[in-house]
Image (cartoon, grey):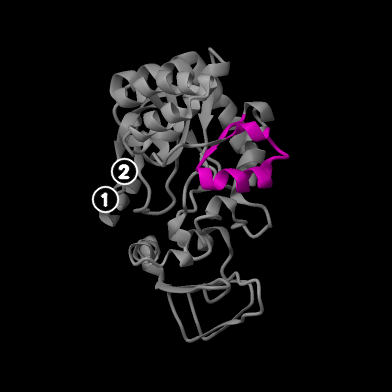
Amino acid sequence: MAGGSGERFYPLSRQHRPKQLLPLLGDGVTLLEHALRRCLTVVPSEHILIVTSSTLQQPIAELVGRLIPRDNIIAEPAKRNTAGCLTLAAALIGLVEHSATIAAIPADHYVGDPQRFTQQLTNAFEFAAQNDVIVTFGMRPTRPETGYGYIELGEPLGNGFYRVASFREKPDRATAEMFINQGTFRWNSGMFVFDLEVFERELAMHAPPFGAAISMLRHAYAEGITSLQAETFDSLPNVSIDYALMERTNAIAVVEADFPWDDLGAWDAVRRITSPDSSGTVAIGQVISLESSNATLANYADRSILLCALGVHDIVAVVTDDVVMLCPRDRVQDVRRLVEHLRSSGMEEWL
């Protein structure tokens, strides 16, 4: 799933180069390439689809066309969140495979132990194929995070799998602390594994617009009817797969995943995957920092620009060739408001 816009990573993340196409881990490798490499340890390249936006299809093909067939890089007819993305993927997979077990993996996550990920993804494939359920990955919380949804563990099913007792929306801090203290809640990672037939059955039961769209999309793509592809996709609600299906179905289990993980949602994630200095400051690129603390100072400018900070605390400063962004550390989730303001003000040249 590679169609996101990464607005909370503005100004580094842009319309034509969002965060999944950025080397945010500091190793020169984009998040999408990392995700593909992890998946290639489990399935062959011809069995991997990338579903993205029409504006990103070509940049992604240029980036990873050597890793998977270019025909497997699919452009959505419109932006319809993860429910639309997975509906389209299911429709296309069903054109060539009558029976398949599918893993839905976001392209913009950090995984700190790829070998452990490979093992647990393989286990999830086997469990989903044998137990007629959708499997979701639940991550053990390490902090009272308010930017993630949570999954409540239910009845143990063995080998680290549980029934899902409930899904909980992004909580306030007090509720997040309660979830951690209770010990039975896990972060909702947004990674799923499911049998194609089970997915279609549950969509038809709990999300009829998406269930009905699968057969229409299969027909439209099989016959090459682009107008029907667009019409069918445009008619879908713009909602997440969690809201459309996962929070409604009973045919769902959660595996307690134990590899290091982060969804890299906003600038605070950089601090979690990069070691701060003794003052608690993270410095990226050409930076001078004096008498400052607990700051994230990131200079991504290609030309010769020096980022200097003196006596600043608890801020995020990001420099690119054309934009400088400043905000308090505790407001990084609001950075997308800058993007919304630029768009509504007719300043899209800065996006």
Which residue, given by chain and number where applicable, does mark 2 sit on?
A: 182
Residue 271 shown left or right of residue 329 in the figure = right
Q: Is residue 312 magenta?
A: no
Look at 65% across and 42% down and name the residue there: 61
Crowd rating for badge 2 (residues with CA inside 10 Å; few <14, some 14–19, many 20+): few
Tell me which label, 1 or 2, sits earlier in the chain: 1
Residue 93, x across and y down, in percent: 54, 22
**Which quadrant holds residue 213?**
top left
Three-letter amino acid code at disc 1?
A: Thr
Look at 44% across and 43% down and name the residue there: 140
Residue 282, x across and y down, in percent: 55, 70
Residue 295, x across and y down, in percent: 48, 74
Q: Is residue 112 visible?
A: no
Crowd rating for badge 1 (residues with CA inside 10 Å; few <14, some 14–19, many 20+): some
Look at 43% across and 30% down and name the residue there: 227
Position above or below: 79 against 46 = below
Towards the viewer: 241 or 169: 241
Residue 294, x across and y down, in percent: 47, 73
**Which quadrant holds residue 283?**
bottom right
Q: Nearer the viewer, mark 1 or mark 2?
A: 1
Q: Is residue 65 magenta?
A: yes
Position above or below: 26 against 219 = below
Which residue, given by chain and number where applicable, does mark 1 sit on?
A: 175
Three-letter amino acid code at disc 2?
A: Gln
| Distance (Cα) linking label 1 and label 2 | 10 Å
Q: Residue furthest right?
A: 66
Magenta residues (range): 48-73
